[in-house]
Image (tube, helix red, strand yellow):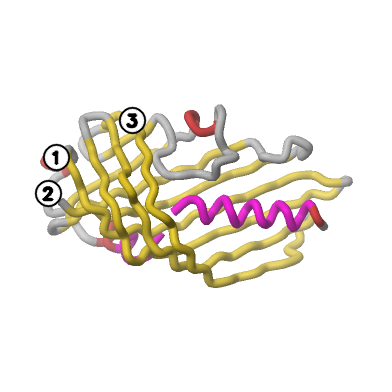
Amino acid sequence: MLRLLSLMAMVSFLISSCQKERGFADEFLNNPPDDTPGNINLNGNWRFVGQSAHTGTTIEYNDFGEHNRLESEMDYISKNPVGTFNFTSNKMSINNVGYLLQGVVTMRTWLDGTLVSEMTDDVEEVIPPGSNNATFRKIGTDSLSFDGAPMDLPSYLDGPVMPNMKMGAKYYMSNDTLYMRFRFNEALEIPDPSMDGDLQLFGDIVIALKK
């Protein structure tokens, strides 16, 4: 039970350390772009005006002959955004980006294929301003492929995990706003070396930027 509670705390930390606002996602999916992707010049400074995300973590492991599965998902929006993004021909810099996260977390626990608990809770958390850099390659006229994770991840997921974390982004302009949708689905090692299992981290993130 102690191990289960520890893992559930770890899952909560994982998903809160990634970043979906449904409104931004709907805007991205439903509104046609004003410009064709080939006409968008990403280079320069952009003001961060909002973010939305659907993120989650799945952990599966065996313990004393029992198969355990922990699922955790978060949907959230950002309030009071601050900071900027800067793009060059192959680099994205995140500069002092922060916001107030407001969302909902759902956690489920499965034992040998049977759902034994499910909890849903509101969450509000101040994400302090942070900075990061990531290089990318352009794919076609509307997509980017990153060599590492451009978004912040928990500090204990370091070493070989961080540089191997892959993430793609698709973008377009609507009115005066640049929308970028980041997606990832990554298998990672469970931080607890004594455990034999699998950890899956996934996310669907939409950010909005203005010149």
By secondary structure, the bulk of the magenta-drawn segment is best described as: helix
Provide the residue span drawn in magenta.
Answer: 3-26
Residue in view at x 53 percent, y 72 percent: 122
Q: Nearer the viewer, residue 81 or 15?
A: 81
Hey, which quadrant is residue 192 in on the image? top right
Residue type indicated by callout 2: Asp
At label 3, counting other C-alpha atoms closer than 10 Å, the crowd grade (few under 14, some 14-19, many 20 or more) is some
Q: Is residue 198 left or right of residue 88?
A: right
Residue where numbered disc 1 is placed: 41
Name the front one of labels 1 and 2.
Answer: 1
Residue where numbered disc 2 is placed: 35
Q: Position of residue 38 (x, y in %)?
A: 14, 38
Task: Point out the residue furthest to the right here.
Answer: 64
Residue where numbered disc 3 is placed: 135
Q: Nearer the viewer, residue 148 or 94?
A: 94
Q: Position of residue 182 (x, y in %)?
A: 37, 46
Cα separation, mark 3 vs mark 1, equals: 17 Å
Q: Is residue 136 above or below residue 172?
A: above
Are the residues at dot 1 and dot 2 in contact (C-beta closer than 8 Å)? no
Whether the magenta-drawn stretch holds residue 21 is answered as yes
